[in-house]
Amino acid sequence: EMCCGTKSILHSLLVSSSLIATVTAQGPPDDDAMPDWAAKYQRLPVKKTLRQRDFDKGTYRIREPGRYRLGEDITFNPRPDTDFWPEFGDADYPVSKFYLGFFSAITIETSGVWLDLNGHTIKQSDEHYLKQRFFSCIELNDGPFELNGGVSSLNLEVND
C-alpha cells in the first residue's frame, strides 16, 4: 500500500523553484512555533477542501495561490474506466504533461500555496500502483520532469 502522510505530526517545508508548500498531517503547529510567513498562511481562509470526488477524474492541479486542506483520506484511483489514463484531448490533462499517465495525486503549479493534510492521508490505490509505477502523492510542478528533462518526448501533441 503506497501512502503519503502519517498520523504523527509531519511539518515539512518543501521548496522548489521558489514554490513553498507546507504539509501537515495533524494540522499546523501553534503560531508561536511557526515562522512569520507560516503564521500568515495559517490565518488565510481555506480556498478549497479537497475530497475523494476531486480526484476521480485525475490529478488535482493547484494552479492558484491559497490555502488547501484535505477533508478526508484520499485513495488515488483515477479513471479506472480508461485504464487510469487521461482521455486524449482533455485540456485539463494535456498529453505534453501527462504522457506518463497520472503521475501524481496533487500537483502544485504556483507559488503561495499552503497544503494542509489536516490529519488525513493520500495514498495510491493498489490497482493504480500496478498500472502506474511512476508516481508521487504531491508534485511541486506541472509535470514529472523539468522542461527538456526526464524521458524523451513522445511527440503526441503539436509543439510538444
Image: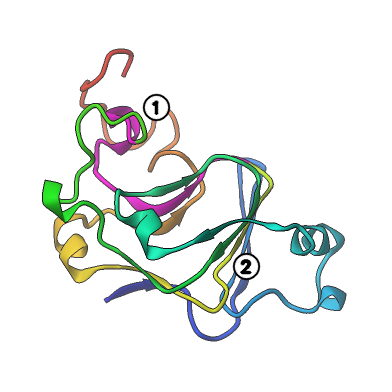
Q: Which residue is mark 2?
A: 12
- Residue corresponding to mark 1: 148
Front position among marks 2 and 1: 2
Estimate the x, y position of residue 35 in percent, counting from the top left: 83, 65
The residue lying at 39 percent from left, 27 percent from top is 148
Above-or-below relation of 152 to 134: above
Q: Is residue 44 above or below residue 3?
A: above
Residue at 60% in and 40% down: 64
Left/right of residue 13 with respect to residue 123 in the rendered view: right
Task: Please report the bounds of the magenta region as a residue range.
Answer: 93-110
Q: Position of residue 92 (x, y in %)?
A: 36, 34
Q: Are marks 2 and 1 in contact (CB under 8 Å)?
A: no
Residue at horizontal 31%, vertical 49%?
58
In the figure, 146 relative to 76: above or below? above
Residue 122 in percent (x, y) is at 41, 69
Snapshot quadrant of residue 159: top left
Decide: few, some or many residues near mark 2? Use Cα within 10 Å; few <14, some 14-19, many ≥20.
few
The quadrant of the image that shows the N terminus is: bottom left
- Looking at the image, residue 72 sits to the left or right of residue 153; the answer is right
Circle 2: residue type: Ser
Q: Quadrant of residue 118?
A: bottom right
Task: Give the position of the C terminus as an image quadrant.
Answer: top left
Q: What amino acid is found at the position of numbered circle 1 in the picture?
A: Asn
Where is residue 83 shown, x and y percent of the image?
Answer: 12, 50
